[in-house]
């Protein structure tokens, strides 16, 4: 099948790899423009672009999708199908109408739950037991199109959003392969999304990363896992930012919110119990296990953790 692929980050790479491995004719790849990355702000291509170039696939990086240039490119490529995976742009109706078989999107949630930019992170933040991916026909709204196929997987008790990303990316490729096979057989059965069940997963913001120890231990641990690897949850210690990469509820402990409750473990009062911070990074230092941190910086019980 003649396909145009639209995607940008690591999450989209396995899906493009799968299309290539299955022998589809990927006539072009649309991806976001190169962006400056790191301290030196070096202009860096998106992972999807790097993969496409390795396979000799033409790459297009339109800045806008509504000025007619992207539409003209797509009409010239004349795909039978457009596959979209984490592209990061909303496609206007004139683009959606170009391919014979429409535009199929692979979304990182069990729709209609978690429409929007950060479905995987919010799955973890909200403490869901199950995650998944959904293929759907694209419509004008944000992730509102008819669903085609869903694949699910349990969320690990200690799994971070980054780890779940790494597991869902190949599951998305599986979902895409199965969806295309159903399309080939003429067996797709689009199902409208139930609006009453829809929820929204907005983009993460650094402002939400500050830890409020009045929240329950479980809520705090889910937030910490959901914000790893970005933007990373944090608290404050002696006026410096202390990033927290992992934590667990501390059974059998309770105390004032934000107060250190142990001299040899980083157990902090939270809600009606306590959390144990397991991996931390103090501003100006390296990331390390909390046990190593405490060996280098002795803290007395009663010490307060609060926003810097």
Image (spheres, rainbow, N blue to C red):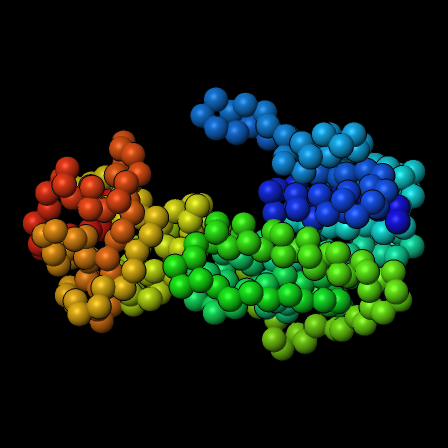
Q: Position of residue 63 (x, y in %)?
A: 72, 35
- In this image, 293 relative to 225: left or right? left
How many numbered callouts?
A: 0
Q: Position of residue 155 (x, y in %)?
A: 48, 64
Between 23 and 87, the one lying in front of the other is: 23
Q: Is residue 249 visible?
A: yes
Q: Position of residue 2 (x, y in %)?
A: 88, 46
Report the residue at 16% width, 53% height from top.
265
**Image quarter of residue 238:** top left
Q: Is residue 206 visible?
A: no
Q: Position of residue 247 (x, y in %)?
A: 30, 56
Report the residue at 77% width, 61% height from top.
179
Between 286 and 92, the one lying in front of the other is: 286
Report the residue at 9% width, 52% height from top.
263
203 in relation to 39, above or below: below
Report the residue at 27% width, 51% height from top.
278
202 in relation to 16, above or below: below
- In this image, 247 relative to 269: left or right? right
Between 43 and 179, the one lying in front of the other is: 179
- Quarter of the image with the C terminus is top left
């Amino acid at each position: 099948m003649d396909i145009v692929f639209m995607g940008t980050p690591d999450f989209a790479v396995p899906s493009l790899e799968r299309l290539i491995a299955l022998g589809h004719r990927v006539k072009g790849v649309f991806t976001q423009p190169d962006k400056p990355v790191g301290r030196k702000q070096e202009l860096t291509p998106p992972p999807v672009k790097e993969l496409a170039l390795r396979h000799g696939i033409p790459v297009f990086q339109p800045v806008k999708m509504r000025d007619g240039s992207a539409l003209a490119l797509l009409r010239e490529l004349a795909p039978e199908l457009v596959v979209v995976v984490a592209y990061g742009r909303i496609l206007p109706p004139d683009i959606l109408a170009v391919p014979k078989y429409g535009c199929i999107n692979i979304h990182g949630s069990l729709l209609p739950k978690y429409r929007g930019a950060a479905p995987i992170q919010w799955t973890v933040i909200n403490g869901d037991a199950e995650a998944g991916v959904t293929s759907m026909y694209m419509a004008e709204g944000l992730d509102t199109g008819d669903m085609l196929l869903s694949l699910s997987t349990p969320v690990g008790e200690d799994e971070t959003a980054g780890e779940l990303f790494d597991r869902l990316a190949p599951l998305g490729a599986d979902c895409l392969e199965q969806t295309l096979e159903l399309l080939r057989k003429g067996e797709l059965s689009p199902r409208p999304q139930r609006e009453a069940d829809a929820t929204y997963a907005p983009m993460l913001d650094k402002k939400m990363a500050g830890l409020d120890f009045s929240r329950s231990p479980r809520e705090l641990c889910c937030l910490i896992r959901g914000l790893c690897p970005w933007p990373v949850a944090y608290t404050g210690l002696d006026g410096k930012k202390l990033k927290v990469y992992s934590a667990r509820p501390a059974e059998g402990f309770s105390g004032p919110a934000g107060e250190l409750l142990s001299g040899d473990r980083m157990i902090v009062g939270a809600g009606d119990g306590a959390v144990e911070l397991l991996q931390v990074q103090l501003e100006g230092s390296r990331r390390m296990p909390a046990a190593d941190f405490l060996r280098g910086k002795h803290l007395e019980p009663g010490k307060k953790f609060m926003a810097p």
